[in-house]
């Protein structure tokens, strides 16, 4: 049973949960002394490098350096914002929280409103499946495709009649969507006053005319001819179709897929178009149902169509998901990679399916993962394979057991590609240059793995199959030269692309004010080395927070969030005990307002912090340092900041000098440069 609390209360609640329990929900952890360890999901970790400490409430990877608290982990692991990460944790611990959408922000309200409109439209499609006058066609489809009612219910399968149902029921849809939106806002903890204010501020988007345009924008309505009054007519996109609602990981319907029941229809399958709430490469169909099973079985089956997925789930393969379109982006690759490294490609057996698998295989190889492949020939896809077997078996036993065996015996898709280049019955050419051309094709196939041992083994095997006289070492050397050659080509292309991007950015910058440019730079720049040095010094040695030089150093710090953090730490130093130090800082970072990079770096440093009592227990003289050491350390940091500031000024003056028109202007800038250079030289002497 879910409980409802405020957003702030949920953040507090999350802090009470051991961090190992939160991280253990997403990856496998094992006890190791006082800590828990596991393979870091943020890089290709061969050995457990991630350490999780419940007492400090911090995780840290000692290979890639990623660190933070439980919320930071979920932010990065699930590619979520700070607020979304809190909501994500709240979902699986059974807590519903207040609305995080800022009142009056039209874009956020628009998204929430759109989700509710889609929810009501989906309800209409579902109603058609039980309506006696409309459901016969739908029920016949389920019988024909051997889909049990519970499976149809699980995937919310619906039916769009041949009429313009959305247009006919637009007023009802909008009224119910507003009611549903109000319920959502109440669920999120808003009172009646705030709800009324939100609805009033955005009343324009709730009008039927605005809702019509919105549904056209997301592709649920199509624009037709104009009537005699020059008014645009609209019609439903989905008519006489089985509806497959597409849900995100929060089980919200964000789009629809459909299959025509008219054999003469030009488009057998038709999907919602991409929009501000639906980007197909960011969604795997069925992942909201499959995520837990994928983790439990440590395996994912990738298929191509809605019916393939539904049939697989029907037969017990609940670790299956369907790709949307012809491929996946890095976000989806990473999502899968964090769940499992065992990938089964089970797309259609036709040429289009093979090409799609080649693309997906290539992307996974780039990430060091070697997918395996299931061949359904002579059948077209998993749906046809399992249903044909169902006809011949008892309760699907044959199809399920045969597919289980196929998956168990699946071989790397990479080997299938190599076997297509050199089939078993292939007549080996006699000339070496012809053999080298074939090897180049194989090298190109293996290139994403670079010089991974799995690639090197296949280089040698391919050389032997081609009856090359070269030794294994020679073949590997030829392959490495190939890698070097394509790396040089890629670097050249990347350099050209970078120059093109920089030229484009420079043009854009020239069209904006200097103030806007500066704000953009300050916002996007990563933490500088000297900023990291300052953070590390102050956190590991809190006595530095009261040093007289600190205010002068802060004058040079341009990053506002860093100044805010340091001023808070300075105040904190007098208010808490050493035992509260780490948890209090982590708690402050979790309140939001800080960049993910800053939170991760501070958490990484805190992982190294030890109170004075602990240091004395392990015979370290003292946590406090003598005044001379502190003075020197902070003076060095101040000098580096001052030098950075002067270097920035020097760069600005050089640009200014290029644009000087008169000799007097040039001399004036030259004098300023001379002063700056003297300052830099003076600092270099002192460093």
Image (cartoon, rainbow, N blue to C red):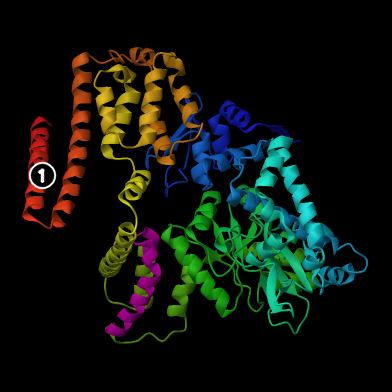
Which x, y percent locates residue 353? 57, 74
Residue 488 lies within the magenta run: no
Is residue 343 visible from the viewing direction of this image?
A: yes
Identify the residue shown where x is 29% and y is 29%: 554
Residue 439 lies within the magenta run: yes
Image check: 85 left or right of 489? Answer: right
Image check: 490 left or right of 268? Answer: left
Quadrant (top left/top right/bottom left/bottom right) for the C terminus:
top left
- Magenta part of the chain: 433-455
Rendered position, 168 above or below 8: below
Q: Quadrant of residue 185?
A: top right
Which x, y percent locates residue 18? 56, 28
Which x, y percent locates residue 151? 78, 59
Image check: 520 left or right of 139? Answer: left
Rendered position, 387 above or below 173: below
Identify the residue shown where x is 66% and y is 62%: 214
Rendered position, 30 above or below 520: above
Identify the residue shown where x is 78% and y is 76%: 261
Quadrant (top left/top right/bottom left/bottom right) for the N terminus:
top right
Identify the residue shown where x is 76% and y is 82%: 263
Which residue is labeled 1 in the image? Answer: 673
Is residue 341 visible from the viewing direction of this image?
A: no
User: What SS does tag 1 mark?
Assistant: helix
| Residue placed most toward the observer, 152 or 435 | 152
């Amino acid at each position: 049973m879910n409980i409802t609390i405020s957003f702030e209360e949920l953040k507090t609640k999350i802090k009470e949960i051991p961090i190992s329990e939160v991280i253990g929900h997403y990856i496998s952890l094992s006890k190791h002394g006082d800590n828990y360890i596991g393979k870091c999901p943020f890089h290709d970790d061969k050995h457990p490098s991630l350490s999780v400490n419940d007492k400090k409430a911090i995780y840290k990877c000692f290979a890639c350096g990623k660190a933070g608290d439980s919320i930071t982990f979920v932010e990065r692991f699930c590619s979520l914002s700070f607020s979304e990460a809190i909501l994500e944790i709240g979902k699986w611990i059974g807590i519903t929280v207040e609305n995080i959408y800022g009142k009056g922000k039209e874009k956020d309200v628009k998204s929430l409103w759109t989700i509710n409109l889609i929810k009501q439209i989906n309800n209409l499609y579902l109603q058609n499946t039980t309506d006696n006058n409309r459901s016969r066609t739908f029920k016949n489809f389920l019988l024909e495709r051997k889909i049990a009612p519970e499976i149809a219910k699980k995937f919310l399968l619906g039916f769009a009649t041949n009429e313009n149902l959305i247009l006919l029921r637009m007023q009802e849809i909008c009224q119910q969507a507003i009611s549903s939106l109000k319920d959502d806002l109440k669920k999120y903890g808003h009172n009646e006053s705030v709800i009324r204010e939100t609805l009033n501020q955005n009343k324009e988007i709730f009008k039927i005319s605005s809702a019509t345009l919105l549904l056209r924008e997301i592709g649920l309505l199509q624009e037709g001819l104009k009537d005699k009054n020059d008014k645009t007519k609209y019609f439903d996109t989905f008519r006489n179709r089985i509806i497959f609602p597409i849900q995100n990981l929060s089980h919200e319907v964000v789009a629809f897929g459909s299959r025509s029941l008219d054999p003469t229809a030009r488009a057998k399958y038709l999907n919602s178009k991409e929009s501000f709430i639906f980007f197909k490469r960011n969604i795997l169909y069925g992942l909201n149902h499959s995520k837990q099973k994928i983790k439990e079985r440590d395996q994912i089956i990738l298929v191509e169509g809605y019916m393939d997925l539904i049939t697989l789930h029907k037969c017990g393969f609940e670790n299956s998901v369907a790709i949307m379109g012809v491929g996946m982006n890095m976000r989806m690759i990473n999502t899968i990679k964090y769940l499992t490294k065992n990938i089964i490609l089970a797309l259609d057996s036709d040429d289009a399916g093979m090409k799609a698998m080649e693309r997906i295989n290539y992307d996974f190889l780039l990430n060091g993962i070697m997918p395996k492949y299931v061949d359904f020939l002579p059948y077209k896809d998993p749906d046809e394979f399992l249903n044909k077997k169902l006809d011949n078996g008892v309760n699907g036993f044959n199809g399920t057991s045969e597919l289980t065996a196929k998956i168990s015996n699946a071989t790397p898709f990479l080997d299938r590609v190599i076997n297509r280049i050199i089939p078993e019955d292939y007549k080996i050419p006699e000339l070496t240059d012809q053999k080298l051309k074939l090897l180049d094709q194989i090298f190109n196939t293996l290139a994403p793995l670079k010089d991974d041992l799995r690639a090197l083994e296949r280089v040698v095997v391919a050389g032997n199959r081609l009856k090359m006289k070269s030794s294994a070492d020679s073949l590997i050397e030829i392959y490495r030269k190939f890698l070097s050659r394509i790396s040089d080509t890629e670097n050249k292309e990347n350099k050209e692309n970078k120059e093109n991007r920089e030229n484009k950015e420079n043009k854009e910058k020239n069209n904006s004010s200097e103030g806007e440019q500066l704000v953009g730079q300050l916002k996007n720049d990563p933490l500088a080395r000297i900023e990291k040095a300052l953070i590390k010094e102050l956190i590991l040695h809190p006595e530095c927070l009261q040093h007289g030089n600190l205010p002068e150093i802060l004058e040079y710090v341009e990053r506002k969030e860093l100044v805010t953090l340091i001023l808070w730490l300075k105040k904190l130093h007098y208010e808490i005990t050493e035992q509260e130090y780490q948890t209090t800082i982590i708690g402050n970072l979790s309140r939001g307002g800080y960049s993910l990079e800053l939170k991760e770096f501070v958490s990484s440093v805190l992982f190294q912090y030890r109170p004075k009592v602990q240091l004395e227990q392990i015979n370290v003289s003292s946590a406090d340092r003598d005044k001379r050491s502190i003075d020197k350390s902070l003076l060095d940091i101040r000098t580096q900041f001052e030098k950075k500031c002067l270097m920035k000024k020097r760069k600005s003056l050089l640009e200014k000098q290029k644009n000087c028109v008169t000799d007097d202007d040039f001399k004036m800038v030259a004098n300023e440069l001379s002063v700056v250079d003297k300052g830099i030289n003076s600092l270099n002497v002192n460093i």
